[in-house]
Image (cartoon, rainbow, N blue to C red):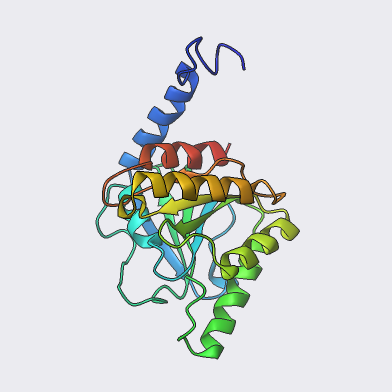
Amino acid sequence: MTTEEYSDDGSISAGREAVAETARRLFSGPVGFLKSAPELQFLPEPDYPEVAFAGRSNVGKSSLLNALTNRNGLARTSNTPGRTQELNIFDVGDPVAFRLVDMPGYGFAKAPKDVVRKWRFLINDYLRGRAVLKRVLVLVDSRHGLKDVDRDLMKMLDEAAVSYRLVLTKADKIKATELDAAMTRLTAEARTHVAAHPEILATSSEGGLGLAELRAAVLEAIG
């Protein structure tokens, strides 16, 4: 590492602190809902880089998006798994710097088969065909870890060469030792996937844990 990245004592460098501050200001500024896209034809023109949030139904995507942007009602939250059935797109910045995409939750077995099929096609087509998609943040509930449906998505992202990063949610719901163990397991598994970022982030939408790091990670992802 150069001295521009880390100081002698291993602390985060001024450069990385600058990224974190820029991210904080961006997310504290204008952030607005642009549109919902039930099909690819309804997506906005690919004019800005995008970072997508994916995860099992009820993993806490909407809550994390709200916490990330310091807005209570930006993304709709519900106790009913599978409520988000479209790609919901949000503009960040004025002028727009990038877009966040809240993807339909997956893995909800009680949904009608035709609805599940529609979600799957929408997700697959978006991830494989969106040139401005810079990274997918795959959210994983800290209490439950990776499930087979998560691994299916990770495999598809690997095959499509779409960069992604695992993000633990609801980290405040488990003990510190359990969180450390979950981080270790996910880090080991991430390193076996070619398109996965090697570092895992732990977050809590309620307690604020990891939000600053996640904001910086989004900014770094868009380059």
Residue 131 shows up from this direction? yes
Residue drawn at 59 percent across, 69 percent down: 148
Asked if 172 appears above or below 95 in the picture, the reply is: below
Residue in the foreground of this view, choosing between 214 and 52: 214
- The picture places residue 82, in percent across and down from the top left corner, at 42, 77
Q: Residue furthest right?
A: 159
The quadrant of the rendering that contains the N terminus is: top right
Left or right: 100 as drawn, with respect to 176: right
Residue drawn at 55 percent across, 18 percent down: 5
Residue in the foreground of this view, choosing between 203 and 95: 203
Residue drawn at 36 percent across, 61 percent down: 62
Residue drawn at 49 percent across, 46 percent down: 183
Asked if 85 appears above or below 8 in the picture, the reply is: below
The quadrant of the rendering that contains the C terminus is: top right
Residue in the foreground of this view, choosing between 209 and 186: 186
Q: How many marks?
A: 0
Residue 98 shows up from this direction? no
- The picture places residue 97, in percent across and down from the top left corner, at 47, 42
Left or right: 1 as drawn, with respect to 145: right
- The picture places residue 69, in percent across and down from the top left corner, at 33, 48
Residue in the foreground of this view, choosing between 217 and 148: 148
